[in-house]
Amino acid sequence: MVQRPLLPAVGLAAVGGVLLTASFEPVAIPWLLPLGVGCYALATRDLGVRRSGLVGLVFGVVFYFSHISWMKDSVGPDAWVALSAVEAAFYGLLGLAVPLLRRLPGWPLWLAAAWTTMETIRSGWPFSGMPWGRLAFAAIDTPAAPAVAYVGMTGLSFLLALSGFCLARFAEAALVRERRRAWAAAAVGVLAALVTPAVVPYDVPEAGSATVAVVQGDVPGPGNDILWDHEQVTRNHVDATIGLADDVAAGRAPRPDFVLWPENSTAVDPFEPGRVNTGIREAVEAAQVPVVVGGIVDDGAKHVLNQGIVWDPVTGAGDRYTKHHPVPYGEYIPFRDIWDPKFGQLALITRDMRSGTRTEPLRVAGVGLGDAICFDVAYDDVMPPQVRDGAELLTVQTSNASFIFTHQIEQQFAITRLRAIEAGRWLAVASTNGQTGVISPDGSVVASARPRTTAVLVERVGLSTALTPAMRLGPWPARILGLLTIGALVSGAVTYRRRRELDGPTLENEPEDQPDRHPAEPRVPSPDPSEAPVV
């Protein structure tokens, strides 16, 4: 096999990474997504394992470093480089598998399964992984978005990857003037699977309704530092809730069934006596309905918990949800007993945040509430299990103050809207200073607050206990695609090895000045002298 030159392949991979980044917020041109994925397949075409891995890595570096560039200015350049490098490496590892999978008939199917499996793995490992950049997350506001209610985030990523790889296979067939009818039909079939749910969306019946008040208290000072004046942050939410109570009493607003505060609306333990605890009690007493408070709770001398706490006007603090996925090197230091850094931003993490495990919905004013805190919304093991356990309404408590001047808040809000479609539930988002909103089950935003303002949204929302097909499938799409990937890799490895044995060494691996390894035998005259006629 004669391998392609490496430099054009690297350039094409870089173009693909740029196109994929542009399909997400803030550029948000989603039709570029299949082109970016297709470039990945074309860039790794006709390359050996190591070269394909290198080209895949280039794609990952260009994509991921640009996709989460917001981390550079919000968390720090060191965290941005470290996380981007780890996530980019997964695209390089996938590149190592491309030559094996391309040996199989219908390789776009197997490569799409492998891509989706790669996304699943990197979304949960190492530590808690990083789901940002999954193909499904770019689908909001497209005809493909309703498909997530049928196949879930994993299934939607698979269909989007398959569309890109079918497009690449069609381009290859066109280049060599191969019969293209079959691949055109395959591309049309994938497209139909993506857009048919837009014509026939899955409607979840509602079994009731509730009125929710969502509070965005705002962050004083520079706006991007929740600790700049954390007591004033709490006071802002208290005052906004008391103002809501005054509006209800005057008939200017309907009485809510409960009030939702954001993550970090209290940055110190709200159970400890002091102004924060007093302020919460004051707000709850004024509202006369439960308030779901977002607070940092002490858990011994070395640990804290990031919790959503149901504070009832009669019984006080009750049900609690604990954040499932604290951010490594942002909210805790992995293996601190081995390595305890005392420099830069890491020195500020004096206590590690523990992970929660709750999947049972919170009970708030008689409503089963499926909660998520900040980045939790991007993980498949947080909201979907709560929906299957009976959550009638979804909420997200987030503190995006650190990212308020970046495009992270737009990316997270897009993910949140997709979660509402996937679950077939109304969803309320409370943020300290942006983006706060109320989202309907079809992903549309029915109310929102302007960033960096104090606002209270009061909306009537539907309640439901019915499950979408995606919720019924649960983790099975990821499991099935993982098994398909393993089987395809084994089969591809066998085929790849046999082909190499038949092809022998490539011309690219034979130096020009190397002597011939198989010199020709001396030419024997014909006929041989012994066979010459006897004279």
Image (spheres, rainbow, N blue to C red):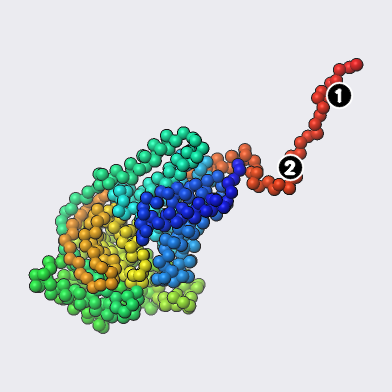
Residue 137 position by quadrant:
bottom left
Which one is in front, 155 or 516?
A: 516
Q: Mark yes or no: residue 65 visible.
A: yes
Residue projecting furthest to the bottom: 274
Disc 2 and disc 1 in contact, CB within 8 angstroms: no
Q: Which residue is identified by label 1?
A: 529
Which one is in front, 71 or 210?
A: 71
Q: Mark yes or no: residue 305 visible.
A: no
Picture residue at 45% right of the left edge, 67% below the top: 80
SS for dot 1: helix
Q: CA distance from mark 2 to mark 1?
A: 30 Å
Q: Amino acid at mark 2?
A: Arg
Q: Position of residue 459 (x, y in %)?
A: 17, 63
Q: Which residue is identified by label 2?
A: 517
Picture residue at 37% right of the left edge, 50% below the top: 31
Label 1, residues with CA under 10 Å away: few <14, some 14-19, many ≥20: few
Q: Position of residue 172 (x, y in %)?
A: 49, 41
Q: Is residue 169 above or below residue 40?
A: above
The reply, left or right, for residue 400 in relation to residue 277 is right
Mark 2 vs mark 1: which is more N-terminal?
2
Q: Position of residue 152 (x, y in %)?
A: 33, 51
Picture residue at 52% right of the left edge, 48% below the top: 44
SS for dot 2: loop
Q: Quadrant of the C terminus?
A: top right
Which one is in front, 324 or 83?
A: 83
